[in-house]
Image: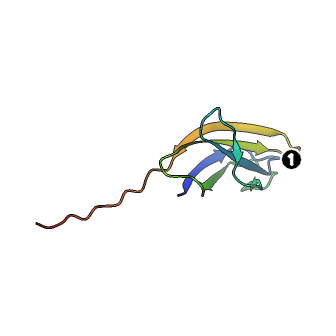
Amino acid sequence: MEDEWGWSAGSQVHRPGFHVYRSQSSDSPWIRLKDRMLPSEVPTSSRVCATYAFMDEDAEADVTYYYRLEGIDVRGNRTSHGPVTGMMPLCMHPTEESSP
């Protein structure tokens, strides 16, 4: 299953990207979902906002996850945002009705 979520970021000055973390509760250990940072959508000199989307390809159906976003600037300073929660619903398939 896949769980997609997005966010908007303000000025991207000196911020080359983000890391996304997931946990199954707000007090459980956080797991970084990608080895590499998600790159900024705009140049690091830009003062414009940007919109991002992230697909959690390993999300299991009917499980609530907590996600945290970590912005990283060019000096290596980290800023944490979140957590937010999300759940991928179980797939619903229509049932075939039998005729009498």
User: Residue extending furthest left?
Assistant: 100
Residue at the spot x=73%, y=48% of the render?
Answer: 19
Residue under the point 55% across and 53% down: 3
Q: How many marks?
A: 1
Q: Residue at x 64, y 51 (%)?
A: 51
Q: Which residue is the extreme one toward the right?
A: 75
In depth, the one of 91 and 43 nearer the eye is 91
Residue 69 image point, x, y percent: 69, 43
| The quarter of the displayed image where residue 34 is located | bottom right
Residue at screen point 69% across, 51% down: 33
Side (left or right) of 71 relative to 22:
right
Q: Position of residue 38 (x, y in %)?
A: 73, 54
How is the protein colored in the picture? rainbow
Report the side of 84 relative to 36 (left or right). left
Residue at the limit of the structure toward the bottom, as seen here: 99
- 64 left or right of 42 in image: left
- Which quadrant would the C terminus be assigned to in this image? bottom left
Q: Residue 65 versus residue 72: which sits nearer the camera?
A: 65
Q: Amino acid at mark 1?
A: Val
Dot 1 lies on which element? loop
Q: Residue 24 in the image: x percent, y percent?
A: 59, 40
Question: Where is mark 1, residue-wise?
Answer: 74
- Neighbours of disc 1 within 10 Å: few (<14), some (14-19), many (20+): few
The location of residue 88, given as percent across then percent down, is 49, 50
